[in-house]
Image: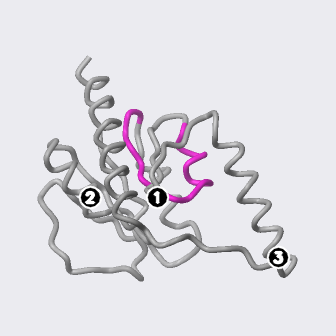
Amino acid sequence: MKIFIDGDASPVKQDVVEIATNHQVEVVIVTSVDHFTTKEYPANVSVVYVDKGQDMADFRIVSLIQKHDILVTQDYGLASLVLAKARVIHHSPWEYTTDNIDLLLAQRYHGGQLRKAGHRTKGPKPYTEEQRYSFRRILTKVLNEQLDINAD
C-alpha cells in the first residue's frame, strides 16, 4: 500500500509525509517538472516528475495507483478515475465516495460553464489550521483502515 499525492498544488504534502512515515508507509508525490525541488524527504518518500502539460500528473497517477492505495488530490476528475480501486481524500478535508463524486463533477462542470460564459467564480478560501487538523485526522483514520485491510 502506498499514499499518492497529486503534488502540484497540495497544501498537505508535509502532513502526509509525517503521518505516512510514522506508519511506515511509502509516499509517492507526483508533480510537474515545473515544481522541481531539491528538498530532501525521508527514505519512504519518492517524487515522480512528469512533463509539463495538462493532466500529465493525473495520467501518471492513474497508471501507478493500485488497489488499496490512498490518493490525496483536489482534482475531482482524477478522483473519479481512481475511486474504483483506491481511497481518495481531498485536503479540505473530506473523502471522495461513489455517493458524492457525481455531484462534485456536475458542480465542476457548471462552474466551468459559468467561467466560459464570462462569469467570475470564487476561488478557494485560504487553508486553515482547523482544516489541516481535520485532514490529518481523516488521513490517519483511512490509513489505519487500509492497513487493517492489507493485514488480512
Do tag 1 and tag 3 residues touch (Cβ < 8 Å)?
A: no
Name the amino acid, label 1.
Answer: Arg
The C terminus appears in which quarter of the rendering? top left
State the SS at label 2.
helix
Q: Position of residue 29 (x, y in %)?
A: 33, 61
Closer to the eye: label 2 or 3: 2
Mark seen at residue 116: 3
- Check the image and name the residue furthest to the front: 130
Q: Which residues are magenta?
A: 67-83
Q: Which residue is denoted by mark 1 in the rendering?
A: 60
Specify the quadrant of the image occupied by residue 67: top left
The vertical placement of 31 against 97, above or below, is below
Q: Is residue 121 magenta?
A: no
Give how far apart the Cα atoms at labels 1 and 3 are.
Answer: 28 Å
Which residue is labeled 2 in the image? Answer: 15
SS under mark 1: helix
Q: Nearer the viewer, residue 14 or 31?
A: 14
Q: CA distance from mark 2 to mark 3?
A: 35 Å
> Can you name the residue that lies furthest to the right here?
117
- Identified by mark 3, the residue type is Lys
Q: Residue at horizontal 26%, vertical 30%?
A: 147
